[in-house]
Image (spheres, rainbow, N blue to C red):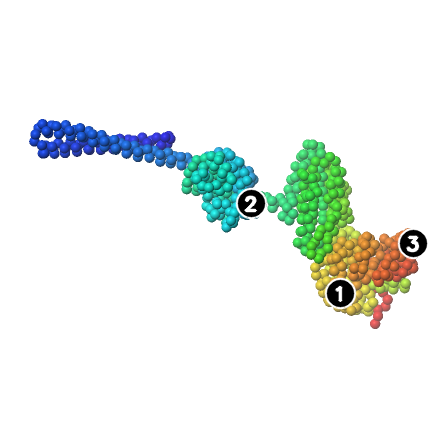
């Protein structure tokens, strides 16, 4: 008897004694009063009366003794049953108290633990230590949404759970017997395991280990089953309705805790990881650099930080769409991850830029060895009818302790090295930071900021350079060349601002403006009577590959009344742009050719393209790069190259235009070799339209 049950037992015993005494007194009084009166009325013989009264006394004693025995026996039976009920109630209350304590402890764990596995392990431990169960386990639904497997457990005989995999797919012929109850949001309870046929090997092992009762309680996320809490006990008939209600609350709170953890981790991931690539973002990278710096200072080691850029990403997005651009960045992310050492970090900073943390280096130049592996060009299959994309990376690097002392500073220095002179200028190479780069970068950034508003401030204008016949000096046409006179920096060379515009994407609006102005100018000259002139306009690869560019050109031509049958517009594209995306550029050029526009291949000879590609390109002329022309008169190799190009052009039925002619000797050699069209300072420097007009012949008609 427990301490809680002793007081009710004493009270019950007192009531029993009082009840027996009262019954005995009532029976005695009634017997004496009624029996003596009856004998006196019925018997006249005194001897017989005396004998009967004696017999009556013994009969009374015997009857009352028997009645008293029965009454006491009956009341003792009632008392025993009451004690059993009280003991069972005490045990039941004790179990419920343990489950209440378990529920409270698990809720406390949910509030303080922020890791899924840790919470599940702690919940199982609490169920055993506080809840009093012999074995507790948690199972979660697997990725296939059909099976459920244990992920955490505590208690005795844990090998009972070995290999447990429950098929919980409703309607599946292989579904576990408990699947129907679990999917119906009901606990699955067996209060005597040995009384039913084995459901699986785990059931058989549990019976062999002495377990008698089992409860499996599901928890959900809305209508979706997330998992179960399982409890095993060596006591039979342990799980009643009240206890199951509490266990259901425990399971529901555990499921809620998992959802809270998942939401917190998703929120943390969204703030610390890049959603496109799954890589750490800048904030997490800086945190890891800080940790690496602490170790490096303690162990006197080096760390390296690299900034990388995917070259040509903007062109891919402009020509193939954002989806292909995202795919390219994801492929680069996987490639970088596969080539890094364990413990190093690669992060995605956005817009095709990545950063790498290289820890525990013996010397700073170890960064160079890593860069050689990371910067190897590769081809990416684009699928469909698209040709493979040739992917190139460029990189800048900074090293602790020589370049900077903190994570943000190291990232800044690596970025400065990456953009030194433009990332395109060192494709496939890693540039190491030097302190003098900072001043150039500050100037670059200031110039880039000025460039953003140059068109709105009316700082851009066109100069025109004549293209002449070397035989008679007549002007055949002009090339439109963009010039920038900035309010702060003065006249800025195209060699400085054009790469900036390419990198920032401003080249599209600049190119559109140049095309509009050039077409307006040639339309004006045609209206003045110079009907033989043509106007050459340079195109960037991004501009050419922009979807709908040919439609945009048509609108410009119509706006200025330029006729397809007598088209003065010539568009020039560099050989380098052609090589980078031969198929896409070729298709775009064919669309322009159908508009009656002539196409010239600019800077020919600098792109190292296979000559076999020339017959596949819809070009009308090759423009010989000035680097070949510059060597004429002093370099026999240059003259032989020009001669070869003349023969090549004749065989392919192409025209030739020599660029950068500056001396009479160069002009005469070109003429002798068969190149009759040229441009350069010898004939005229680029100048505004009103100055160039003086070089034109008299207008016709």
* Residue 604 placement (x, y as % from top left): 82, 56
Residue position for label 1: 594
- Tell me what residue is drawn at x 83 percent, y 59 percent: 622
Where on the picture, by quarter, is residue 614? bottom right
Quadrant in which the C terminus appears? bottom right
* Residue 693 placement (x, y as % from top left): 83, 64
* Residue 47 placement (x, y as % from top left): 9, 27
* Residue 455 placement (x, y as % from top left): 73, 57
- Is disc 2 surrounded by few (<14), some (14 to 19) or many (20+) residues within 10 Å? some
Judge left or right: residue 459 versus residue 661. Answer: left
Element type at marker 1?
loop
Element type at marker 2?
loop
Quadrant in which the N terminus appears? top left
- Tell me what residue is drawn at x 74 percent, y 43 percent: 373
- Tell me what residue is drawn at x 75 percent, y 57 percent: 583
Cβ atoms at labels 1 and 2 below 8 Å apart: no
Judge left or right: residue 168 versus residue 463. Answer: left
- Tell me what residue is drawn at x 71 percent, y 52 percent: 381
Sequence-first disc among 2 and 3: 2
Q: Nearer the viewer, mark 1 or mark 2?
A: 2
* C-alpha separation, residue under disc 2 versus residue under disc 3: 78 Å
Residue position for label 2: 142
Residue position for label 3: 633
Where on the picture, by quarter, is residue 645? bottom right
Residue extending farthest to the left is 44
* Image mark for residue 256: none
Rendered position, 384 above or below 307: below
- Is disc 3 surrounded by few (<14), some (14 to 19) or many (20+) residues within 10 Å? some
């Amino acid at each position: 008897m427990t301490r809680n049950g002793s007081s009710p037992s004493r009270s019950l015993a007192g009531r029993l004694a009082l009840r027996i005494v009262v019954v005995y007194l009532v029976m005695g009084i009634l017997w004496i009063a009624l029996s003596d009166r009856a004998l006196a009325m019925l018997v006249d013989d005194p001897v017989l009366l005396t004998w009967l009264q004696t017999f009556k006394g013994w009969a009374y004693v015997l009857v009352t003794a028997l009645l008293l025995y029965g009454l006491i026996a009956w009341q003792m039976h009632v008392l025993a049953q009451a004690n059993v009920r009280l003991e069972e109630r005490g045990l039941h209350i004790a179990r419920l108290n343990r489950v209440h304590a378990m529920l409270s402890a698990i809720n406390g764990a949910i509030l303080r633990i922020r890791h899924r596995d840790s919470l599940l392990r702690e919940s199982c431990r609490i169920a055993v230590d506080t809840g009093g169960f012999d074995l507790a386990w948690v199972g979660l639904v697997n990725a296939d949404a059909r099976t459920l497997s244990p992920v955490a457990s505590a208690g005795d005989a844990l090998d009972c759970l070995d290999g447990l995999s429950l098929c919980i797919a409703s309607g599946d012929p292989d579904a576990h017997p408990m699947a129907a109850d679990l999917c119906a949001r009901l606990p699955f309870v067996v209060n005597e395991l040995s009384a039913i046929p084995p459901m699986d090997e785990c059931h058989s092992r549990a019976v062999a280990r002495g377990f008698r009762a089992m409860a499996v309680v599901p928890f959900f996320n809305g209508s979706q089953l997330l998992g179960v809490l399982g409890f095993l006990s060596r006591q039979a008939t342990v799980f009643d309705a009240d206890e199951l209600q509490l266990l259901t609350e425990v399971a529901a709170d555990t499921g809620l805790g998992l959802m809270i953890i998942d939401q917190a981790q998703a929120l943390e991931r969204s703030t610390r990881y890049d959603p496109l690539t799954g890589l750490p973002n800048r904030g997490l990278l800086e945190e890891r650099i800080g940790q690496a710096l602490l170790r490096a200072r303690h162990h006197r080691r080096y760390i390296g930080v690299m900034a990388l850029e995917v070259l040509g990403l903007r062109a891919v997005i402009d020509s193939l769409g954002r989806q292909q651009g995202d795919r390219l960045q994801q492929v680069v992310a996987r490639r970088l991850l596969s080539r890094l050492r364990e413990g190093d970090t690669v992060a995605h900073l956005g817009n095709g830029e990545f950063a790498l943390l290289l820890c525990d280096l013996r010397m700073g130049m170890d960064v160079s060895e890593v860069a050689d592996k990371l910067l190897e060009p590769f081809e990416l299959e684009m699928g469909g009818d698209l040709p493979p994309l040739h992917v190139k990376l460029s990189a800048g690097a900074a090293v602790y302790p020589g370049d900077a002392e903190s994570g943000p500073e190291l990232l800044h220095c690596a970025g400065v090295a990456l953009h030194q002179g433009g990332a395109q200028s060192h494709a496939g190479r890693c540039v190491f930071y030097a302190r003098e780069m900072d001043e150039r970068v500050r100037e670059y950034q200031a110039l880039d900021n000025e460039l953003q508003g140059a068109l709105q401030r009316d700082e851009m204008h066109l100069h025109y350079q004549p293209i002449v016949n070397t035989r008679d000096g007549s002007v055949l046409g002009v090339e439109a060349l963009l010039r920038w006179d900035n309010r702060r920096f003065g006249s800025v060379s195209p060699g400085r601002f054009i790469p900036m515009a390419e990198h920032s994407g401003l080249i599209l609006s600049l190119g559109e403006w140049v095309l509009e102005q050039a077409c307006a100018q040639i339309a004006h000259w045609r209206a003045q009577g110079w009907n033989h002139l043509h106007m050459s306009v340079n195109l960037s690869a991004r501009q050419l590959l922009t979807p709908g560019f040919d439609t945009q050109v048509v609108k410009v031509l119509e706006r200025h009344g330029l006729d397809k049958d007598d088209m003065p517009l010539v568009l020039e594209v560099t050989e380098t742009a052609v090589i980078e995306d031969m198929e896409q550029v070729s298709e775009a050029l064919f669309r322009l050719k159908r508009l009656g526009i002539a196409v010239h291949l600019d800077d020919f000879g600098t792109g190292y393209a296979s000559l076999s590609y020339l017959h596949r390109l819809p070009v009308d002329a090759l423009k010989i790069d000035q680097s070949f022309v510059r060597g004429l008169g002093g370099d026999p190799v240059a003259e032989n190259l020009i001669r070869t190009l003349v023969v090549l052009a004749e065989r392919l039925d192409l025209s030739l235009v020599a660029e950068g002619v500056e001396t009479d000797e160069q002009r005469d050699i070109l003429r002798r070799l068969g190149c009759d069209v040229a441009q350069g300072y010898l004939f005229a420097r680029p100048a505004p339209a009103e100055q160039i007009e003086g070089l034109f012949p008299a207008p016709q008609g």
